Amino acid sequence: MKVPLRYQVTNYDCGPTSLLNGLSILFEREEIPPEVLRRIVACSIDWIGEDGTPGKRGTTHAAMAHLSAWLEDCGRAGWLDLSCRYLTGKDVTLAEGSSLRGAILRGGTAVAFIDLDGWHYILLTGVEEDRVLAFDPWILPEPFPVPDVKTDYDHPYLYNRVVPLERFESTDIHPYSFGPYETREAVLMTKGRTK
């Protein structure tokens, strides 16, 4: 059974929420072992806030890299029919022929680190010509203030934003950009073991 994708319950859980949403797209609810949920939640929201409060800056790149490797191990061990790969820097691109674009076009998902008035994780779920389908776990109280980013609540199992592809590719910091190469990060998840 598939379940609708979920939204953050705090200001800080965009990372684990996006990882879990990616797994929800790839697998039926009954296929996801409870240990996977436990590990994702236990190993994320680890970034210390500026005031010294644990978790008040969300999830670090180190935690996402660890979780990506752990999910890949789950695939190797046969817990899930999953391949998972952690990308950084210039590998985080949706250009033709890129690993990121290829995985999404083959039905995979990618948790991407983007700018949204501060750094934030979202789930990329589709690429259609010059636009990207994404599920942003940050629920909006009103329409998104950038006119070329569309909010779509009619596809709760797959996406809630339609974003021009060119926004992601920018090295400038603006809503839905991957930003500078040194901050780029994505976790690719595909159903099936990569040969």
Image (cartoon, helix red, strand yellow):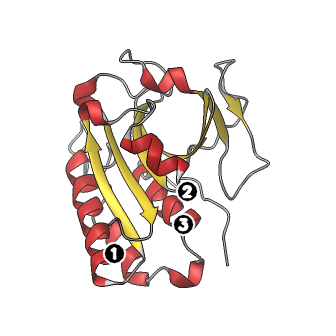
Q: Amino acid at mark 3?
A: Leu
Q: Secondary structure at mark 3?
A: helix
Residue to which mark 3 is pinned: 26
**Disc 2 to disc 3: CB gap under 8 Å:** yes
Left or right placement of residue 44 versus residue 164 in this view: left
Between marks 2 and 1, how big is the CA–CA gap? 17 Å
Against 73, residue 67 (above or below) is: above
The label shown at residue 117 is: none
Where residue 53 appears, as percent x and y from the top left, is 25, 48
The label shown at residue 107 is: 2
Residue to which mark 1 is pinned: 75
Looking at the image, which residue is at 55% across and 56% down? 107
Q: Secondary structure at mark 2?
A: loop
Q: Using the rendered image of the protein, determine whether residue 141 is visible from the camera's viewpoint.
A: yes
Q: Amino acid at mark 2?
A: Gly
Image quarter of the N terminus? bottom right
Looking at the image, which residue is at 52% across and 20% down? 166
Left or right placement of residue 29 versus residue 89 in this view: right
- Farthest residue, direction top: 172
Nearer to us in this view, 171 or 151: 171
Where residue 105 appears, as percent x and y from the top left, is 54, 48
Image quarter of the C terminus? bottom left
Where residue 150 appears, as percent x and y from the top left, is 70, 30
Against 86, residue 26 (above or below) is: below
Where residue 136 appears, as percent x and y from the top left, is 56, 43
Looking at the image, which residue is at 36% across and 23% down? 179
Q: Secondary structure at mark 1?
A: helix
Nearer to us in this view, 95 or 67: 95
